[in-house]
């Protein structure tokens, strides 16, 4: 046997293996990396839909959100599953998961790189997480199919669960089933707003009063349910902003009963109620008649700015004609809770929301948010003093789930 | 696109090299010759008989004395054909060694009819299957009979094949073949579709000693299988020996016990046949996994813990009786399959949530009927009819109240809560399924033949949840009717070239319930009916360039109709999707297979194929967000490009080596994607590789066989298996910073097996160590597989 012939024959199968190996080498695209800096950076949480219908979220740091394009290619913290983003102080919290349900805190390390903290796991998705004090966060687990409401208390620095309190749903209602709409902690009490939504049909047959469950804090004992018939239920489907809190600790509760955000009927005008700091009753002396101030429209999203000013999204279609679940069409405005006036933002197109928590960043005199226009999405910088808006970078994502600065 | 052209060029170079080398090689070897005499059955010498070496240009006619002599033939394996007008053509397999002059005599029988089917003698059934025009690999289990493997593990060693498992014995296994997965690949047991067989009769429940061979059809599936498979088909052929008894017991890690008894009896005078097989499988599947330990919602630790709620047991009894080899029927068999299993459920689609109480179980009874007859009514007309009626009852039980478990098996209780672990249910699924296949083939003459196939299946499910008796979607009947009719024309212009043209008609009718007007005043659950009708067609061709070098090419435009579980769900972790549509694909396959001998004792077999596929509405299992539940959906536009290669080497009977490697680039080609909330949106992943799927994997094996070394009539075998899967990302590769991405790591595993058989295979013992290095092995969504495990198998054959 001739050795060279033999090697020639063996070369063939080896070649086929090498050929396969050659196909696997891929070229990476260059991405506009944002080097870590000591300055604060914008962190935009981009949501990209896969062809299986599942979204993956990328929280990407950017120095500039007003020019060029914002993309997740090669950069950002990846989170597959479903995530809801909320910034509390200098940490961006992502609540959600894929099968496992958790909370991850995204902040910046000494070198300015984005880091993740937290290693927790829950049986059901958390509906929301809010600040109790500088060292404490409280999250709520509330599902239409469950007969318990769970409150989890977190150490805000380590993002570890320090306590869990399970309370029967039957404390707050015997109707099926309360759906989460907002939570705030003020003056030794936790306020939980909800509306009744049938877990199978998602219809809302009970819209003739606002209801907020009051629990003691930090003991988290059920105290009572407070009601007000001047307006309907507080908050709506998945927007999580039924309640806002001002500098004084006063809580404002907005009701819209709008089909665009999950209601199958409405029986009361839109309005904003107040619970004064330290009280556990609605302030009967205060009512912001939103319907009157907007010409019959409703407020679906709120972001508290300061000095009684709130950045809001106002639904521009008459409630009776509104398409259900659409979270739009919306116009942005700043309302004054004290003067009960509405100032619409100029230079911002009418737009649709994404049926989730408002992804807007309050940064000094500006609010940054992403607005869909046709098939594209653009960042807009909104001046909350002059009520004007400037168009910025184009976003390479299907929607923006969070807009923060850390 | 870049990658695409690169792979085509590489493939062409590969083929070119193939041809060049093989020509060069065959000239270098010393020639042999063959001679002999041809006579009639009565002993009379026949003159003028054509004797040819099949697949070559070498041939001659016999002289006055019936003698022939052929010389100048390269050594190798051939088939020698003797044909003469009025006599039946006869073939003999020969093996020519260098410089040898082989003596071969023929005795020809007089022909009774004008046309006679060509009988191929001397090639094993495995080789014959491998030489069909379709891209097919046949795996003989002859060398594996003593191994502790089951059908699933045998398949995992075929090139292009990847068995994805969710865990240990009895866990859901999904099958990927050249990038096709799940039910795109259809399974058959002796030609009978296994589609709706109960879960207790899955691949891992079929022990290797009941299997004679497994045929893996890649891409185009022959018409006679009559299926709507678009990725390929796997046909498991069980033992067909007339009389035998085969009993085996294997025991191994994780308290695994597998018992199999298998036998057949045939009365030689009246053809009465009885076949029976039974098997029992049990495993605690309490293998260790590396998992986070959650206490009070905090991950307090990560630890290696035993799975604690994953027991699986199944039993199957298959009986078949009837007549074989009779005038009216080659096979007329009535049978029944009875099987049952019960299974503890440890996790859902990922390992993120752990359960301690969820159970599911199944029992099924399947009466079967098989009839086949060659040359019925007319010569060359063969018909077969297979029918099965399947009754399965399944239960899904999640009735523990207010309890959650962590990976240590510790329960956290919520007093007063009636919540189930996943979603409180006690669901009974009553499934009935009738399916039947009719095949007719007619050989007009050796050049032209026709085949007709008609298969029909009717599935019906009734669902009741005693924990939620009013559940609206359970009030509607769920039925699925599928019919596939196929017609094929086979043209064999020469013995080297065979081509098949075929057309298929697919009909689907599904009745189920669907939610209408979500979010509107008229939102309701209502009956929903789907009718789909599609036409598919294709061509498959193969050509022998040399007697042992075959080229194959095929194209098919085909459809796959959704399976009941995909449309109707499974009552636990798979949600129904009544809108699921058929998937459509255009498949191109080209491949080559080459076998050659070096010197006398070195046998090489090489094979390679290239796949190009455009799929529309690919049926895909989607994991739902923040939940262990999945839904089947359609991926709108997906392209697959793949190459695979395999190599086998055998030195005498002592040593064999083999290996195969597969690369598949499955990319998303959709411009826009649909979602219920926003409608059509831009697809930012266009052109990128589909995540959560292995794209590069390989396996290799090596074995030594010692005959009569330990004792006379004994065989000692040592086999080693290696398996490799390249790391792949759980989500889209291009997005996010590389260091924070979730990736399923690169995996390599080793199995070692030693077997000894005594008294010509009557007594057998085998020991196997799987995952020798105790590597952490994963599959999609990070599901962990067992670590190092040992198995011992005892087998007795009569």
Image (tube, grey):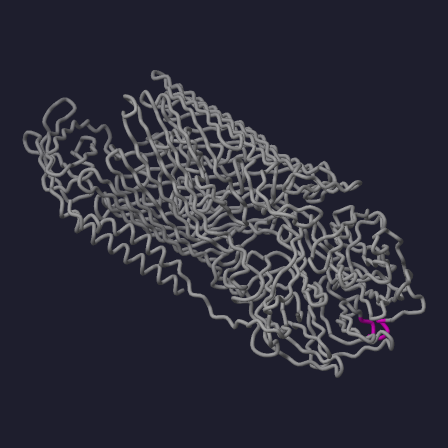
Residue in the image at 33% along x and 56% along y: A19
Residue in the image at 66% along x and 66% along y: A402
Residue A291 inside the magenta-drawn segment = yes
Please provide the residue range marked out in magenta.
A290-297
Q: Nearer the viewer, residue B373 or B617?
A: B617
Is the magenta region chiefly helix, strand or loop? helix
Residue B69 inside the magenta-drawn segment = no
| Left or right side of B429 for B797 | left
| Left or right side of B552 for B734 | right
Q: Work out whether B297 lies above or below B468.
A: below
Q: Is residue B119 visible?
A: no
Give the image location of residue B12, x and y in percent.
29, 58
Q: Quadrant of the N terminus of chain A?
A: top left
Q: How many marks?
A: 0
Q: Quadrant of the C terminus of chain A?
A: bottom right
Give the image location of residue A303, x and y in percent.
76, 70
């Amino acid at each position: 046997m001739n050795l060279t012939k033999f090697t020639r024959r063996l070369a063939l199968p080896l070649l086929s293996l090498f050929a396969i190996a050659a196909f696997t080498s891929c070229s990476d695209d260059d991405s506009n990396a944002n080097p870590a800096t000591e300055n604060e950076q914008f962190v935009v949480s981009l949501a990209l839909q896969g062809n299986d219908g599942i979204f993956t979220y990328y929280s990407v740091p950017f120095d500039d959100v007003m020019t060029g394009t914002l993309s997740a290619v090669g950069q950002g913290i990846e989170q597959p599953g479903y995530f809801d983003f909320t910034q509390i102080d200098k940490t961006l919290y992502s609540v959600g998961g894929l099968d496992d349900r958790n909370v991850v805190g995204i902040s910046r390390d000494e070198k300015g790189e984005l880091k993740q903290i937290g290693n927790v796991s829950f049986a059901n998705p958390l509906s929301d997480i809010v600040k109790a004090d500088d060292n404490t966060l409280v999250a709520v687990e509330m599902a239409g199919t469950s007969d318990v409401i769970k409150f989890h208390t977190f150490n805000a620095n380590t993002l570890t669960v320090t306590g869990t309190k399970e309370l029967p749903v039957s404390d707050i209602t015997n109707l099926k089933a309360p759906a989460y709409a907002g939570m705030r902690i003020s003056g030794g009490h936790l306020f939980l707003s909800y509306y009744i939504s049938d877990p199978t049909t998602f219809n809302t047959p009970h819209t003739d009063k606002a209801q907020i469950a009051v629990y003691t804090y930090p003991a988290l004992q059920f105290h009572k349910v407070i009601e007000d018939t001047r307006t309907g239920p507080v908050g709506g489907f998945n927007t999580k902003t039924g309640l806002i809190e001002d500098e004084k600790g006063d809580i404002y509760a907005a009701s819209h009963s709008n089909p665009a955000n999950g209601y199958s009927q409405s029986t009361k005008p839109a309005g904003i109620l107040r619970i004064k700091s330290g009280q556990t009753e609605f302030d009967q002396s205060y009512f912001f008649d939103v319907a009157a101030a907007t010409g019959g429209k409703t407020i679906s999203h709120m972001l508290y700015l300061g000095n009684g000013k709130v950045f809001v999204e106002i639904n521009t279609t008459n409630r009776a004609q509104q398409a259900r679940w659409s979270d739009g069409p919306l116009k942005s405005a700043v309302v004054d809770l004290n003067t009960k006036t509405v100032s619409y933002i100029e230079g911002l197109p009418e737009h649709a929301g994404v049926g989730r928590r408002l992804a807007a960043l309050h940064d000094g005199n500006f609010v940054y948010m992403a607005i869909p226009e046709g098939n594209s999405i653009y960042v807009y910088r909104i001046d909350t003093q002059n009520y004007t808006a400037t168009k910025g970078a184009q976003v390479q994502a299907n929607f923006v789930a969070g807009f923060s600065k850390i | 696109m870049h990658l695409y052209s690169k792979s085509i060029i590489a493939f062409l170079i590969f083929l070119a090299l193939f041809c060049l080398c093989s020509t060069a090689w065959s000239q270098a070897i010393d020639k042999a010759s063959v001679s002999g005499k041809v006579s009639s059955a009565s002993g009379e010498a026949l003159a003028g008989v054509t004797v040819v070496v099949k697949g070559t240009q070498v041939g001659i006619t016999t002289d006055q004395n019936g003698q022939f002599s052929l010389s100048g033939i390269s050594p190798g394996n051939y088939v020698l054909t003797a044909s003469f007008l009025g006599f039946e053509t006869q073939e003999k397999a020969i093996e020519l060694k260098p410089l040898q002059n082989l003596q071969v005599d023929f005795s020809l029988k007089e022909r009774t009819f004008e046309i006679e089917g060509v009988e191929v003698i001397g090639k094993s059934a495995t080789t014959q299957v491998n030489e069909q025009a379709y891209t097919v690999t046949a795996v003989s289990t002859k060398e594996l009979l003593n191994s502790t493997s089951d059908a699933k593990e045998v398949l995992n060693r075929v090139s292009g094949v990847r068995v994805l498992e969710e865990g240990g014995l009895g866990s859901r296994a999904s099958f990927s073949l050249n990038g096709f997965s799940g039910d795109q690949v259809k399974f058959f047991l002796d030609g009978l579709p296994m589609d709706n067989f109960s879960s207790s009769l899955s691949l891992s429940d079929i022990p290797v000693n009941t299997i004679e061979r497994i045929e893996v059809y890649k891409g185009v599936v022959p018409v006679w299988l009559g299926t709507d498979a678009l990725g390929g088909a796997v046909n498991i052929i069980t033992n067909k020996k007339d009389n035998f008894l085969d009993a085996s017991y294997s025991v191994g890690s994780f308290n695994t016990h597998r018992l199999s008894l298998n036998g057949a009896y045939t009365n030689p005078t009246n053809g009465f046949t009885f076949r029976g097989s039974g098997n029992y499988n049990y495993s605690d599947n309490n293998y260790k996994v590396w998992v986070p330990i959650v206490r009070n919602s905090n991950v307090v630790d990560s630890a290696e813990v035993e799975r604690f709620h994953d027991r699986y047991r199944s039993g199957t009894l298959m009986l078949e009786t009837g007549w074989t080899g009779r005038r009216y029927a080659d096979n007329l068999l009535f049978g029944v399959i009875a099987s049952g299993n019960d299974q503890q459920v440890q996790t859902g689609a990922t390992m993120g949530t752990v359960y301690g109480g969820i159970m599911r179980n199944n029992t099924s009874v399947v009466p079967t009927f098989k009839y086949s007859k060659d040359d019925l009514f007319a010569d060359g007309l063969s018909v077969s009819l297979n029918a099965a009626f399947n009754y399965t009852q399944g239960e899904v039980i999640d009735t523990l109240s207010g309890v959650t478990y962590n990976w240590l098996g510790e329960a956290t209780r919520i007093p007063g809560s009636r919540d189930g672990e996943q979603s409180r249910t006690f669901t009974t699924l009553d499934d009935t399924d009738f399916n039947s296949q009719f095949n007719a083939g007619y050989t007009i003459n050796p050049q032209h033949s026709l085949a007709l196939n008609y298969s029909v299946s009717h599935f019906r499910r009734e669902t009741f949840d005693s924990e939620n008796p009013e559940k609206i979607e359970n009030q509607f009947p769920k039925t699925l009717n599928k019919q596939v009719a196929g017609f094929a024309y086979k043209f064999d212009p020469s013995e080297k070239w065979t081509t098949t043209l075929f057309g298929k008609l697919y009909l689907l009718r599904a009745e189920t319930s669907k939610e209408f007007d979500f979010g509107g005043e008229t939102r309701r659950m209502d009956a929903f009916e789907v009718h789909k009708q599609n036409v598919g067609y294709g061509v498959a061709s193969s050509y022998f360039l040399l007697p042992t070098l075959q080229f194959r090419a095929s194209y098919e435009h085909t459809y796959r109709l959704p399976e009941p579980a995909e449309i109707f769900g499974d009552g636990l972790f798979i949600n129904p999707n009544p809108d699921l549509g058929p998937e459509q694909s255009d498949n191109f396959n080209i491949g080559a297979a080459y076998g050659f001998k070096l010197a006398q004792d070195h046998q090489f077999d090489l094979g390679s194929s290239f796949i190009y596929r455009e799929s529309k509405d690919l049926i895909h299992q989607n994991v739902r967000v923040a939940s262990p539940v999945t839904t089947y959906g359609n991926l709108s536009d997906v392209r697959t490009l793949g190459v695979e290669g395999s190599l086998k080497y055998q030195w005498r009977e002592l040593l064999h080596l083999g290996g195969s490697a597969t690369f598949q680039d499955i990319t998303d080609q959709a411009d826009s994607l649909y979602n219920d909330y926003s409608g059509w949106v831009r697809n930012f992943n266009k052109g990128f590789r589909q995540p959560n799927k292995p794209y590069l994997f390989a396996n290799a094996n090596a074995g030594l066989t010692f005959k009569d070394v330990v004792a006379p009539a004994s065989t000692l075998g040592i086999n080693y298996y290696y398996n490799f899967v390249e790391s792949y990302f759980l989500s889209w590769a291009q997005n996010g910073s590389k260091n924070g991405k979730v990736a399923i790591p690169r995996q390599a595993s080793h199995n070692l097996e030693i077997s000894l058989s005594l008294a010509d295979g009557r007594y057998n013992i085998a020991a196997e160590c799987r995952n020798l290095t105790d590597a952490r092995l994963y599959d999609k969504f990070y599901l962990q597989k067992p670590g190092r495990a040992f198995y011992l198998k005892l087998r007795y054959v009569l």
